[in-house]
Image (spheres, helix red, strand yellow):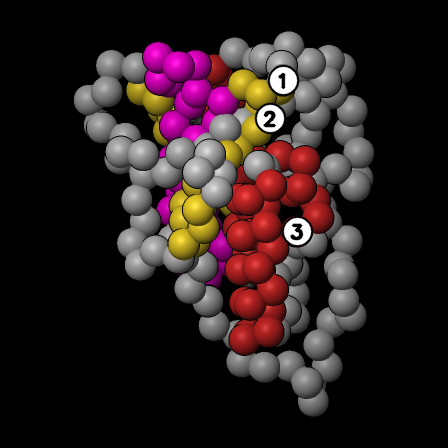
Amino acid sequence: MAALPENCPMCRRAPDVGSPLTPARPTTRPATASTARPRTSPALMVAVDGSSGAATPTAAVRAASPVGEGARTGARASTRAAVADVADAVPPPVEVERWAGALAVATTEVLVGSRPPQQLSRWYAQEVYAAIVRRAGLVVRLHGRPARRVHAHLVALRSCATPSGSHEVSAAVHDGTRVRAVALRVAPFGGRWRVDALVVG
């Protein structure tokens, strides 16, 4: 997936929105003084394209491709929901941007070990989700879980619609230590949105 051009006539900046995500319950007990490790910001470099079944790490963030999965009419606020429900019908582009931004934040929290990956399973293609689980597990094994829950937040968001009806979305997410680039391709899937490609740097 090519990088999003600055002068793309179909691209536009989304309004600055907060993440609709609800807090995830801690999956483990806080680390004690005897077991806590020095915490550094791990490299999260991941590139996955679910449309081809490929999953390869990348040393640089490139524009990716994702397909989106959207939601139900009358979104329900749920403390266990990883991503807010949206409408049954495929939502308009601005809602895709908001949804993708919220998912980028949740994904970043998963990849730093602060959110259970199971909360993302509904929103990603199988190959992409499997790569996220593997990467999150590797980060936890190497760095341990953060002593405090990481609250990532959205810094910037941009999307570009394609003739096929998908949306190429790029986001900047602060993970509590540094700003990470997240690229997604979001497209209608069975009347909803689903991500089928992801790059995180």
Seen in the picture, residue 48 relative to 39 is either above or below; the reply is above
Tell me the residue at 22%/28% (across/down). Answer: 5
Determine contact: label 1, label 2, CB under 8 Å.
Answer: yes
Q: Position of residue 85 (x, y in %)?
A: 70, 25
Q: Where residue 92 sits in the image (x, y, percent)?
A: 52, 11
Residue located beneath label 2 in the image: 69
Residue drawn 60% across the image and 55% down it: 133
Q: Quadrant of the N terminus?
A: top left
Predominant secondary structure in magenta?
strand
Q: Secondary structure at mark 3?
A: helix
Among the two numbered marks 1 and 3 on one chain, the one whose residue lies closer to the N terminus:
3
Which label's residue is closer to the chain start, 1 or 2?
2
Give the structural element (helix, strand or loop) at label 2: loop
Task: Tell me where the magenta segment starts and ends, as one range.
Answer: 161-187
Specify the amino acid type for callout 3.
Pro
Q: Which residue matches tag 3?
A: 117
Q: Nearer the viewer, residue 55 or 99?
A: 55
Amino acid marked by disc 1 = Gly
The residue under label 1 is: 190
Q: Position of residue 194 (x, y in %)?
A: 57, 29
In three-dimensional space, the C-alpha distance between marks 1 and 3, rounded to whole angstroms, equals 23 Å
Mark 1, residues whose alpha carbon is within 10 Å: few (<14), some, or many (≥20)? few
Observer-nearest of 19 and 62: 62
Q: Is residue 60 visible?
A: yes
